[in-house]
Amino acid sequence: MTSQMDYHTIRDVFSRFQASEPEPRGELHHTNAYTLVVAVALSAQATDAGVNKATAALFKVADTPQKMLALGEDGLIEHIKTIGLYRQKARNVIKMSRILVEEYAGEVPSSRAALQSLPGVGRKTANVVLNMWFHYPAQAVDTHIFRVGNRTGIAVGKDVLAVERAIEDNVPVEFQQHAHHWLILHGRYICVARKPKCGACIIQDLCPFEEKTT
């Protein structure tokens, strides 16, 4: 396993990320906290592009939990049937919407525990919502971030929780708000799994990965 990168190098890494993309954004389309929760829940084992295509029409008719309940499970399925695991996801979204209406007055809660109590919402989804909507510097670790963190030494850990903690512990606080976005975009487009595009990498000289490509 790569050793944990030192403070000064991590600062240089994120300074470059910030200079390259000062305000990184998540790629899932949403209009409010509720549509963000739904979009992230639907994105499990699916691409953001595929989710965006399915939700473009969906969110025009169901952008609140009340409207989603009115649409119903069958109506929801018609919109999201191009997405993997759509039947289970539809059940979860309807259950989630009912809980939001009955227990939270139709509003998306702003604590990780409350978010994770919703059907189909795990820690990663909760952290995305906390970060993107409530502007809390939560770190949503997915496969891209797990790979980049360990490959580069930016955030070393044996599981996603360990990597999440490594980001929180090692990345300077001024970069925490956007850290997971910079890392996920870097992993999605540059530091890819099979053949990383090291020649196009803005942190290549700072990265200790031995099997660099040209």
Image (cartoon, rainbow, N blue to C red):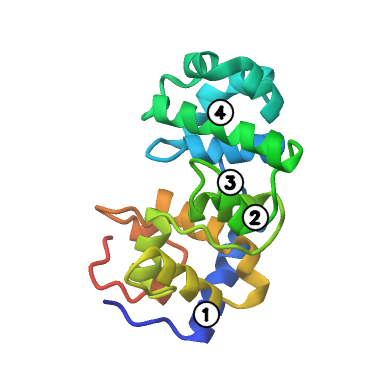
- Earlier residue among tags 4 and 2: 4
- Earlier residue among tags 2 and 1: 2
Q: Residue at x 65, y 75 (%)?
A: 173
Q: Residue at x 30, y 72 (%)?
A: 209
Q: Amino acid at mark 2?
A: Leu
- Earlier residue among tags 1 and 3: 3
Q: Is residue 108 left or right of residue 48?
A: right
Mark 3 or mark 4: which is in front? 4
As helix, strand or loop, the secondary structure at mark 1 comes to helix
Determine which residue is flagged by label 4. Answer: 94
Q: Amino acid at mark 4?
A: Ile
Q: Eyeballing the image, is 174 above or below 96? A: below
**Residue 128 x, y percent position in the rendering:** 58, 52
Determine which residue is flagged by label 3. Answer: 26
- Earlier residue among tags 1 and 4: 4
Measured in 3D between alpha carbons, the distance from the residue under mark 3 to the one under mark 4, in whole angstroms, is 24 Å
Q: Residue at x 28, y 60 (%)?
A: 214
Q: Which mark is residue 170?
A: 1
- Earlier residue among tags 3 and 4: 3
Q: Residue at x 52, y 24 (%)?
A: 53
Determine which residue is flagged by label 2. Answer: 130
Measured in 3D between alpha carbons, the distance from the residue under mark 1 to the one under mark 3, in whole angstroms, is 22 Å
The residue carrying pointer 2 sits among few (fewer than 14), some (14 to 19) or many (20 or more) residues within 10 Å by Cα, namely many
Measured in 3D between alpha carbons, the distance from the residue under mark 3 to the one under mark 2, in whole angstroms, is 13 Å
| Closer to us: 82 or 90 | 90
